[in-house]
Image: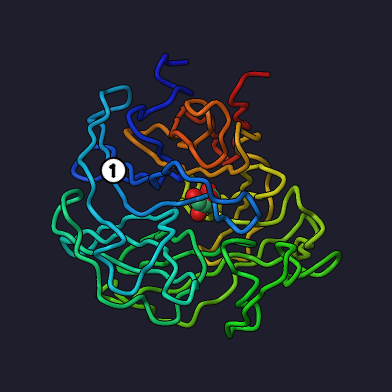
Amino acid sequence: MKSEFNKPLVTHMYTADPSVHVFEGKIYIYPSHDLENDGLDDGKGDHFKMEDYHAFSMDDVGAPVVDHGQFLHVKDVPWATRRMWDADAAYKNGKYYFYFPAQDKDGIFRLGVATNDKPHGTFTPEPNYIPNSFSIDPAVYTEGDTSYIFFGGLWGGQLEQWKTGKHVPFNGDTPGADGPQGDEPAMGPRYAVLSDDMLSFKTEPKEVLILDENGTPLKASDTERRFFEASCVYKYTNGKYYLIYSTGDTHYICYAESDSVTGPYTYKGRVLEPVSGWTNHAYITEFKGKWYLFYHDCELSKGVTHLRNLKYTELEIATDGTITTVKPYGN
Ligand code: FUB
């Protein structure tokens, strides 16, 4: 195991929720930026106070990490007020696109997009959020001419408030009480096809189904396997698609397999065991024929859940797509 693996990757600021792409032959990382604050850890995410994004790059695995500086701040986004959580970048038609969540003036999470002609440097946000967008954790997967955006997160991520397809506010005290319970099917992430200009949804958001080994949707009570947040998709060399996601309150990163990018996906197992801090969030990327897992934990802050740091390690993936579960602190 290389010495740079499983160590804080960025140490001069708190970084979380990696999204990672190979752009211009380098590894580009677009994390969230955690800030110190005294928000309540109340299951609604009030302690995750984030207001800007920095881009980072590495010329190669193990090379120094370059901080390209802040490229988007909430004050520059006309519709957004706070909580710039997990985001993702994409490249198409000679342009770079950055998709991010934020709360609007009514406290409702929406997804925004900003564009640039380089993978770093100032991104220009669209003046309005993406129509029909909601919840958190956007992740884009492109194949050929088609780009899909996956998104959604429970509890503070507000996905339950959209379970009917329309927004139903929730003012209760128990996070998730407005979502499915017990034997009811758990909620899956949502996906939409992006428009050709990448600035809007071409299709209505639909649910991504995650099934168990019998072909039955995972149940809400199956909290060690059901989706909670942080979904993203990659295609492996066996031609199959893999959805990875966090189980939130049980703290695992799991994966599920499908022959189709939009699912249904079948649960396969765990990618990553729990890390220090409450949230677990990961991204899988191929670089020069090897596969890497980027994730975060709270090593630098000594366990403060809302002050996280990125880490990465090489993944072992078998030819049939089976992932050897990463135990971040050894056995
Ligand atoms: O960073 C804030 C939230 O924590 C993210 O949006 C979630 O995925 C979790 O990592």
User: For the point 38% across and 61% down, which residue is it?
Assistant: 100
The one of 308 and 86 positioned closer to us in this rendering: 308
Image quarter hosting the C terminus: top right
User: Residue 215: percent from the left, percent from the top?
Assistant: 76, 63
From where the camera sits, is residue 250 visible?
yes
Q: Is 253 positioned to the left or the right of 312 in the image?
A: right
User: Residue 77: percent from the left, percent from the top?
Assistant: 28, 68
From where the camera sits, is residue 232 visible?
no
User: Can you name the residue that lies furthest to the front here?
Assistant: 38
**Label 1 secondary element:** strand
User: Residue 9: percent from the left, percent from the top?
Assistant: 38, 28
306 is higher (above) or lower (below) than 215: above
The one of 190 and 50 positioned closer to us in this rendering: 50
- Where residue 207 sits, quadrant-wise, is bottom right
User: Residue 136: percent from the left, percent from the top?
Assistant: 49, 63
Please count the marks in the image. 1
61 is higher (above) or lower (below) than 321: above
User: For the point 49% across and 36% down, which residue is it?
Assistant: 296
177 is higher (above) or lower (below) than 6: below
User: Can you name the residue that lies furthest to the right here?
Assistant: 183
Other-residue count near label 1 (Cα within 10 Å), few / some / many at <14 / 14–19 / ≥20: some
User: For the point 41% across and 43% down, which residue is it?
Assistant: 35
Disc 1 marks which amino acid?
Val
- Where residue 76 sits, quadrant-wise, is bottom left
- The residue to which callout 1 is attached is 22
